[in-house]
DNA sequence: GCCCAGGTATAAA
DNA sequence: TTTATACATGGG
């Protein structure tokens, strides 16, 4: 029921769960509440331990979910090579770990994210879970794609996702009938996987890259969004700049840095 | 009220 | 091939 995992001092639970990679963790006092793989979880930091209260009591699973084995600290010199902006961004966002989220949940969340703002993304996803997930003890699980695949676009109208509803249905159907095989994508090379994901209507380069980074834990994908464009335009005049094999981490550092420094874009 | 948001599909040039 | 526009909804 309760798991305690030793974590590095640098690990920052707040930043990790509130950096825009996931949309379904809620903070209350000093604890975070979420639903992972159909199980409610309450997590907090106590001393240098991550304390997890959940029916899903599998240490290995949670170590993987919070990516506790990977040495993020060791990458500071790597990012500093790309200039002071990325160096500062990496430093300010030190402690973010990329979660090992369920790929379907990540895909769906980032389909919903398109041309949208974070608070409304959260709102739509919570309605999606409420209407189509399983009711737990005061929470809802993320809807199964097998359930969504059988719905019609208009069935999603209560979640008010607008034009994105048809994309969610299309994603669920193609995953269900294996036109897009998530298990195969896991073992594909990056460019083939990005291509496969973009067979889904409503999934372009940005959503595919987010799915790879946040759903499949592929750090070599760089999702270019409006914020990143602003940073690239202003600080990296070479638009083809390549941040190397950890470009996904570079992206989330720059994303959060740009959002916390609006003054730099006036 | 007005602008715009972790983009993408589609039409037009 | 490149560029423009519509899209649903609600936060700021």
Image (spheres, coloured by chain):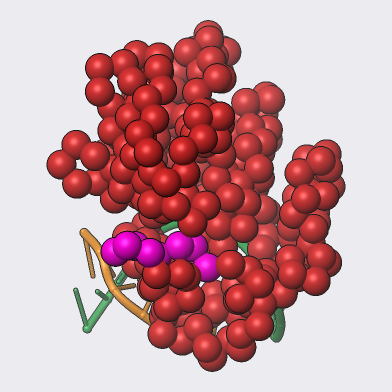
Chain colours: A red, B green, C orange
Q: Quadrant of residue A90?
A: top left
Q: Position of residue A150 (x, y in %)?
A: 66, 83
Is residue A206 among the parts visible in the rendering? Answer: no
Q: Position of residue B8 (x, y in %)?
A: 65, 66
Q: Nearer the viewer, residue A137 or A189?
A: A137
Residue visible at 62% across and 51% down? A103
Query: Residue furthest toward the left?
Result: A29
Q: Compared to A137, does A30 lie above or below? A: above
Q: Nearer the viewer, residue A32 or A221?
A: A32
For the N terminus of chain A, give its image quadrant: top left
Q: Compared to A12, does A14 lie above or below? A: below
What number of labels is visible?
A: 0
Q: Nearer the viewer, residue A231 or A150?
A: A150
Q: Position of residue A98 (x, y in %)?
A: 51, 34
Residue range in magenta is A136-143
Q: Nearer the viewer, residue C2 or A2?
A: A2
Is residue A44 among the parts visible in the rendering? Answer: yes
A139 in magenta: yes
Q: Quadrant of residue A69?
A: top right
């Amino acid at each position: 029921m309760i798991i305690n995992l030793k974590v590095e001092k640098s690990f920052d639970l707040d930043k990790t769960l509130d950096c825009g990679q996931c949309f379904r963790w809620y903070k209350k006092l000093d604890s975070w509440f979420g639903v992972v793989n159909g199980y409610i979880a309450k997590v907090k930091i106590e001393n240098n331990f991550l304390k997890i209260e959940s029916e899903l009591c599998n240490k290995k699973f949670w170590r993987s979910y919070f990516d506790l084995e990977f040495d993020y600290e060791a990458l500071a010199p790597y990012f500093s090579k790309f200039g002071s902006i990325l160096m500062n961004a990496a430093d300010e966002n030190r402690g973010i770990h990329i979660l090992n989220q369920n790929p379907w949940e990540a895909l769906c969340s980032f389909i919903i994210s398109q041309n949208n703002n974070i608070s409304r993304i959260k709102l739509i996803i919570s309605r999606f879970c409420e209407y189509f997930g399983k009711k737990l003890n005061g929470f809802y699980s993320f809807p199964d794609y097998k359930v969504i695949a059988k719905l019609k676009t208009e069935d999603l109208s209560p979640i008010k996702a607008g034009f994105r509803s048809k994309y969610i249905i299309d994603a669920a159907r193609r995953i269900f009938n294996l036109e897009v095989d998530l298990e195969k994508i896991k073992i594909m090379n990056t460019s083939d996987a990005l291509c496969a994901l973009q067979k889904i209507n409503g999934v372009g380069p940005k959503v595919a890259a987010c799915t790879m980074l946040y759903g499949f834990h592929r750090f070599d994908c760089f999702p270019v969004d409006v914020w990143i464009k602003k940073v690239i335009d202003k600080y990296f005049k070479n638009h083809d700049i390549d941040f190397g094999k950890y470009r996904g981490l570079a992206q989330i550092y720059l994303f959060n840095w740009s959002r916390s420094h609006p003054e730099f874009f006036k």
